[in-house]
Structures are given as structure tokens and as C-alpha cells.
Amino acid sequence: MPKDGIERVETGIKGLDKALNGGVPRGNLVLISGGAGTGKSTLSLQFVYNGAKLYGEKGVYFTTEQREDELRKQATRFGWDLAALEKKGLLKLIFLDIVHKVNFYETIETTIRTFKPERVVVDSMVTLADSMSITDFKDLTAISFAQLLENVGPQAQVQQAEKLITRNILYNLYSALKQANVTALLVSELPEKSDFLSADEISEFISDGVILLHYLGIGSAEFRSLQIRKMRYTTHEKDYILYDIANTGIEIKKEAEIKV
């Protein structure tokens, strides 16, 4: 146990754990937000892979973006054998098919309750929230769409009502993850020229932590940096941290410069 008494979950990414003063506080829900090409999915998959491989902690990766076989194939690029960890009962990959709609909330809740993971990834929150607003709305809210319109006033637009629906659904999902006492990474797109830190404009406020990933491509040169915008229950690095997507996954480039 660290001197501050906060139990931490190590990501297994050297430099990032240092920037987090030892790792993510256990039980935190952390938003991973960034644009295309920043490595959001790579970092998140590395989090559950390292958890199972290095620390023997069970993990679940919920994905709306890639099927299970695609994730396993992607992982081989970094030398990660996901199938071996699945066989050992340390890892689950679950594809939430938004085309053939199911009750996503129930799938997530049941999986966590029966598998009892310590680490969870949801990739991505954008697609999941949009889909849950259609498939899970009646189960997760006690009010109708018409009532939502009334609640925001006679001049309300449909977009305002949709935001309220999304907010209600996200609060239910975050609450379920909190009650399960898992440490979770929640992936979101970071819209360009946005004043918010997530596509749903809500997650950054109800998450315990926010890690932003940035990418700049100039000709053949690529520059990536991350910033820990907030992390409850721990001190952390405030400056931008340079990183690469290398042969072994996310690698921090200048670990020696990190100060907490």
C-alpha cells in the first residue's frame, strides 16, 4: 500500500504509472478521450492485457468497434496472446453488436457480476450510448420521451431531449460500474474544436479521471502526447507526456522528465 493509503491499479505502461504516482486509484472510472490515430484502443487493450499477464487480474474488454477475432489479430502486432489469457479465465472479449441489437446494459451488468473482473474497458462510449438510447431506454429510465420534452420546456428541441436520455443512461452505466468496484477505462472520441472532452459532453464530469490523447501528423512525421486532465484521489503529472505506439504497445518516450 502506498504512503498515501490509496491502493492503485498499475497499467503496466512504464512512465504512465509514474505519471499517475503509481497507477490508477483502484475503483476509478477513467475516460480515455482522443481523436483518430491516437491509440485509445491500444492503450485500453494494453491495460487489460497487462492486468491479466503481469498481475493476474481478470479483465473484460467490451467493444462496439471490433469483433473478438479482430481484437486478437490486432493484439498479435504487439506480441500479446489474448487467446492464451482467455483460456486461463483471466480475460474476456465481448463484442456488443449494435446492428443486431441486444440489451447492452444487461450484457455488461451480467458479465461483470458473473465473471467478477477487476479491470474493465468499454470501447467506445459514443457508439454504446447511442445504441443504448434505443435498446435500453425503457429499462433504464422511468420517464417517456414525451415527458423528457415537457421537462425541458415547451420550446425544447429533440436534441435537448436526446442529451437528457444519454445523460440518464450514462449515469446508470457509471453507477453500475461503481457498484461493481471495478477499475475501468471508458473510451470516447474527442471532437475537434470542441469545448468538451468527450463526444457525449457528459463523461468528463462524471468520470473519476480523464486522460486525453493527442496526435499530430506532419508529412511522414508523427507526434503523440497525452495529458492527465484529472485523476481523483491521487497527485499526478500535469504536463503533456510524449508517447509512441511501438512494437510492444504504448511507450512513454521521456519517462525521466516526468515529475509528480
Image: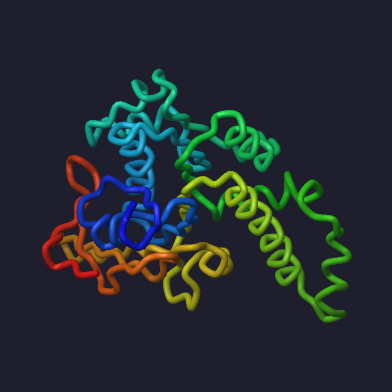
Where is residue 256? Give x, y as percent. Answer: 11, 63
User: Camera-side residue: 68 or 55?
Assistant: 55
Total marks placed: 0
User: Camera-side residue: 72 or 107?
Assistant: 107
Q: Quadrant of the C terminus?
A: bottom left
Residue drawn at (49%, 55%), measured in percent from left and top? 29
Quadrant of res 243: bottom left
Quadrant of res 161: bottom right
Residue drawn at (13%, 68%), measured in percent from left and top? 257
Where is residue 172? Give x, y as percent. Answer: 68, 54
Q: Is residue 217 above or below residue 82?
A: below
User: Camera-side residue: 255 or 153?
Assistant: 255
Q: Is residue 238 above or below residue 53?
A: below
Where is residue 80? Give x, y as percent. Answer: 27, 31
Where is residue 219? Give x, y as percent. Answer: 16, 63
Q: Outermost residue toward the top?
A: 87
Instruction: Say left or right for 253 vs 225.
Output: left
Instruction: Say left or right for 182 vs 16.
Output: right
Give the color scheme: rainbow, by chain, secondary structure or one colour: rainbow
Instruction: Say left or right for 22 vs 7.
Output: left
Residue drawn at (31%, 38%), measured in percent from left and top? 50
